[in-house]
Amino acid sequence: MTTILQVTGLTKRIHKKIVLKDITFSIGKGEIVGLVGPNGAGKTTIMKSILNLTPSNKGDIFIEGERTSYHHHSNFNEIGALIENPSLYPYLTGLDHLKMYSFENKIDTNTQKILDSLEMNSFITKKVKNYSLGMKQKLGICIALINNPKLVILDEPMNGLDPKSNVNLRNLIIELSKTGISFLISSHILSELEKLITQVIVINQGEIVTKTSLKELREVGNNYLTLKTSDNFLCSKLLSNAGLKNNVLNNGERIQALIDSPNSINDICKIIFKNNIDIIDMDRLSNDLETSLLRLID
Ligand SMILES: Nc1ncnc2c1ncn2[C@@H]1O[C@H](COP(=O)(O)OP(=O)(O)OP(=O)(O)O)[C@@H](O)[C@H]1O
C-alpha cells in the first residue's frame, strides 16, 4: 500500500512539559485512521504538528515520501484539514468561503457533490453569522475537502452534527476513502468513529499506546463466553479443575468463562460434552471499543 503520511519520532515540549514523545506512525492510501485518547493526550498537537501549525522539537513528517517542514511545504496542497473550530468570516456566505478556499476559485462538480452529501444547499448562500454550530462545522469539513486532497485531517468532525448529518458525513468519508483519499480523524464519539475507521491509534499522555485494527482493539482485555448448561455448578467445577477461569453468575443461572486463548472455546466444549452435560444456551460477550480503550489506557 502506498504510504501517504509518515510521522517519525515526533517529540514536542511546551515549557518543561513533554506533550508528544517519539510519535511514529504512517497512513496508507485510502486508509481511515482514528486518533483516540483522553483529554489532553496530545491528539490536536499531533494534527497541528503534521500541518506545521505548531513547531516540534524533534521528528519528521513525510507526505508521499517527501519531507515537509516550515520551509518545505509545497506538498501541503495535498492536505485538507479542520482543526478545532473552523475560522469563518461572519459577513461572508458559505459559498464565498468555498470560492475563496478553492484553488480554482470556483465550485466544481466534486464540491457540489460534497454540498449535496452533507445537505448544505439550503444554507450555503446565507451569511455565516446566521449559521448554527452544525452548519459551521459542515462548512469547515467542506473547506477541508474542497481541493481534492490526498490526506484529510479532521479534529472532532462530528462536533455539533445531528444524527442524520453524522450518517451523511460517515458515508461521504467512506466513499472518498474508496477513491484513495486518506483520513486521520480524532473523535471522542467512539461509537461513531468505529463505524468509519480501518485503523486506530491510541494515544495517552503524549505517547502512542498502540496502533492496531479495530478488531484487535476490541479483543484487548477480556473476552467471555456465557453458558447455560444442564448442570452449571458441576460444569463450573470441571472447568476450574481443568484450569479454565470461570464464575457461576446469578445464583447458578449462567456460567461466565474466560476466553484467553484460541483453544478456549474448544476446550470448554470438550469438557462439557465429555461429562454428558447439555448446553442449553451459549453467547460470546466482547468488549465494546470504549471498554477496550479504557482497559488499554489503564
Ligand atoms: N498552547 C499551549 N500551552 C501550554 N500547554 C499546551 C498548549 N497546547 C497544548 N498544551 C498541552 O499539551 C497537551 C496536549 O494537548 P492537546 O490539545 O493536543 O490534547 P488533545 O488530546 O487534543 O485533548 P482534547 O481531547 O481535550 O482535545 C495537554 O497537556 C495540553 O495542556
Image: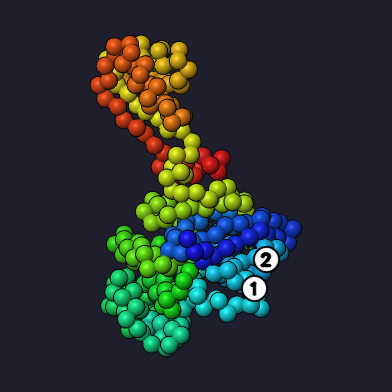
Which image quarter: residue 14? bottom right
Q: Nearer the viewer, mark 2 or mark 1?
A: 1
- Image coords of residue 248 (percent x, y): 38, 19
Quick one: label 1, few (<14), some, or many (20+) residues within 10 Å?
some
Q: Which residue does the image show at 38% across and 71% down from the upper left?
A: 138
Pick out the residue farthest to the front.
Answer: 1
Residue type at the position of mark 1? Ser
- Say left or right for 166 vs 66: left
Determine whether the residue tagged by mark 2 lies in a helix, strand or loop: loop
Residue with the mark numbered 1: 69
Question: Relative to 223, does residue 269 appear above or below in the rendering?
Answer: above
- Image coords of residue 161 (percent x, y): 36, 64
- Image coords of residue 120 (percent x, y): 31, 75
Q: Are marks 2 and 1 in contact (CB under 8 Å)?
A: no
Residue with the mark numbered 2: 56
Residue type at the position of mark 2? Ser
